[in-house]
Amino acid sequence: MTTKGMENKKIGFIGTGKMGEALIRGILQARLVPSGNIYAGDMDLSKLKALEKELKINTCKENHGVVVNSDIIIIAVKPQIVPEVLNEIKSSIKNQLIISIAAGVTIDTYENNLPPGTKVVRVMPNIAATVKEASSAISPGSAVSKEDMAIAGSILNAIGRTVTVQENLMDAVTGLSGSGPAYIFMIIEAMADGGVHEGLGRDTAKLLAAQTVLGAAKMVLETGSHTGELKDMVTSPGGTTIRGLRVMEEHGVRIAMMNAVIAACERSKELGKKS
């Protein structure tokens, strides 16, 4: 579905925390739908009022109001609240598309607690949604069509880039891109510390480190080149870069990053069994 095909859709949000708000702002900035086509509900009424005033969206004191006014419903609450929300809205579901960004909540949880045939798409975005650079993965439920997936993709692409994966890979997504920003924040902080050690001011060092990471990531995404090939472009014989890379290899930076992703993935699996 193109952006044009979205303009008449009404999108409801149950939960307007960081991710919910980031999606609302992304949708409006991408002009997927006009502000009057967005309905939002949240326990924090002051937050709702602020969003209503700033973004000119519709707000509802009860989730029922969000559901009955929407073609697409985005569940953006904390995972432990999802069962309560589903119990509240199940009688109001009439063929709407449900998009869940509640971490760790399976598609089965939705399909088993909502009317038969309910269309559910599970999404794992990350915190970079707040700056419209999210890495999001989406998985379709049993009743979801290609058109439904295109709709979900259009919405998530408004805050970054989106891939489609099987649901059993969502733990791997969580370990890589869900937790990944924290790994990169640590890398940026460490690089900046090195710059400070060598005499750069803190603000200058942080800017250089962050922009370096941003630029390197953009090269990977836009050139399509293998990361090893890009690395070799910077690494001249006997130069400064190969000296730094040798130290990184000596200290196991590569395996540490791999193990961080694997450990976070395993923890995601553990938490999923408890939910």
Image (tube, helix red, strand yellow):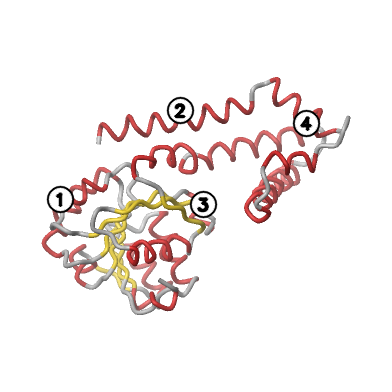
Mark 2 lies on residue: 263
Residue 209 x, y percent position in the rendering: 71, 43
Upstream in sequence: badge 1 or badge 3: 1
Could you give the CA–CA distance between mark 3 and mark 4, rounded to whole angstroms? 29 Å
Could you give the CA–CA distance between mark 1 and mark 2, rounded to whole angstroms? 31 Å
Upstream in sequence: badge 3 or badge 4: 3
Mark 3 lies on residue: 128
Q: Nearer the viewer, mark 1 or mark 3?
A: 1
Q: Amino acid at mark 2?
A: Ala
Tell which of 134 and 207 is nearer to you: 134
Mark 4 lies on residue: 197
Mark 1 lies on residue: 113
Upstream in sequence: badge 1 or badge 2: 1
- At 34% from the left edge and 72% from the top edge, which residue is drawn? 38
Upstream in sequence: badge 4 or badge 1: 1
Residue 261 x, y percent position in the rendering: 50, 33
Q: Is residue 42 left or right of residue 155?
A: left
Upstream in sequence: badge 2 or badge 4: 4
Could you give the CA–CA distance between mark 1 and mark 3, rounded to whole angstroms? 31 Å
Q: Nearer the viewer, mark 4 or mark 1?
A: 1
Q: Amino acid at mark 1?
A: Asn
Q: Amino acid at mark 4?
A: His
Upstream in sequence: badge 2 or badge 3: 3
Could you give the CA–CA distance between mark 2 and mark 4, rounded to whole angstroms? 31 Å
Q: Is residue 225 left or right of residue 257?
A: right
Could you give the CA–CA distance between mark 4 and mark 1, rounded to whole angstroms? 56 Å
- At 33% from the left edge and 51% from the top edge, which residue is drawn? 122
Q: Nearer the viewer, mark 2 or mark 4?
A: 2
